[in-house]
Amino acid sequence: MVKLTKLFKRSPTVSVIRLNGVIGSGSRFGGPGLNDAAMAPIIERAFAKGKPKAVALAINSPGGSPVQSALIAARIRRLAAEKNLKVYAFCEDVAASGGYWLATAGDEIYADRSSIVGSIGVISASFGFHELMTRQGIERRVHTAGEDKSMLDPFRPEKPEDVERLKTLQKVIHNNFIEQVKQRRGKMLRGEDLFTGEIWVGPQAVENGLVDGIGHLVPKMQELFGEDVNLSVFGPKKSLLSRFGGPAAAGIMNDVEDRSLWSRFGL
């Protein structure tokens, strides 16, 4: 009987959730996008299917929407508490800005020696076209009900009061980000100037307490759960159009936005 029990003993399972790409509320061309609506059923399955011993997050993201970052991280924490499962976060190339917000959903965070981590701040970038329009003889016509409705219109000269209003909004979001990091990392945080938007590579992130150690997902899970651990991967699937080389023009603007975020970290 003992031999039969050993024969049919199941290997422990760890669910791996892939959180890859720019975080945004809308769908990105070639997939459902990294947002709460798209990730919700994936995360739910990861916590429920196969009775996992733990959940691992494989994160590779330069950030994006702070709201979607918060929603995804909060969903992971709710399920972790409900299922009484520990969550391990693994930073790949980048876990910066919203990407690091996702990492804070982990009870323990690990990074590669060359991973870029941090960027705990808020950024807003745009262009101004008013001088170009003037040279080309183009007249901008905007009619609003509400004096602040056309704030930071890129086709009009920038107003100091609009910039000040934007900075006020950014400060609130930044404070929310800081609160999330302090709540999740607590006394593990070391050093000053952690919340200036600065970035660090793996060993530096360990030193300042933003991550717990240098480590990769597979060997770490084998170390904790045994060499025979079964890693069950969950992540968004590519759309049918992208699999068959869908229309390239459909995602040009999204691609430009995504590349601008990745390029901030040299990728």
Image (cartoon, helix red, strand yellow):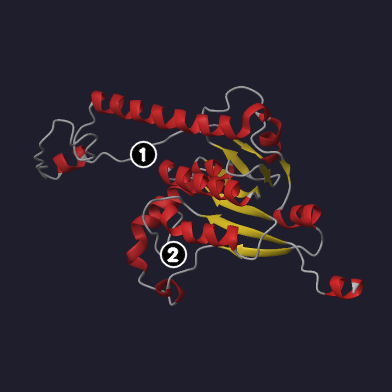
Residue, x 76% and y 62% (percent of image)? 229
Q: Quadrant of residue 174?
A: top left
Residue 41 in view in this figure: yes
Secondary structure beneath dot 2 equals loop
Above or below 116: residue 179: above
Expressed as whole percent of the image width and height from the top left, the position of residue 147 reads 14, 30
- Residue that carries the numbered disc 2 in the rendered image: 31
Residue type at mark 1? Ala
Residue 237 is left or right of residue 232, and the answer is left
Residue, x 52% and y 34% (percent of image)? 180
Expressed as whole percent of the image width and height from the top left, the position of residue 186 reads 63, 29
First of labels 2, 1 by sequence position = 2
Expressed as whole percent of the image width and height from the top left, the position of residue 117 reads 60, 40
Residue 20 is left or right of residue 219, and the answer is left
Q: Toward the viewer: 101 or 83?
A: 83
Residue 266 in view in this figure: no
Q: What is the quadrant of the N terminus in the image?
A: bottom right
- Residue that carries the numbered disc 1 in the rendered image: 125
Residue, x 80% and y 53% (percent of image)? 223
Above or below 187: residue 136: below
Residue, x 58% and y 44% (percent of image)? 105
Residue 250 is left or right of residue 229, and the answer is left
Q: Find residue 96 and name its label.
A: none
Above or below 67: residue 191: above
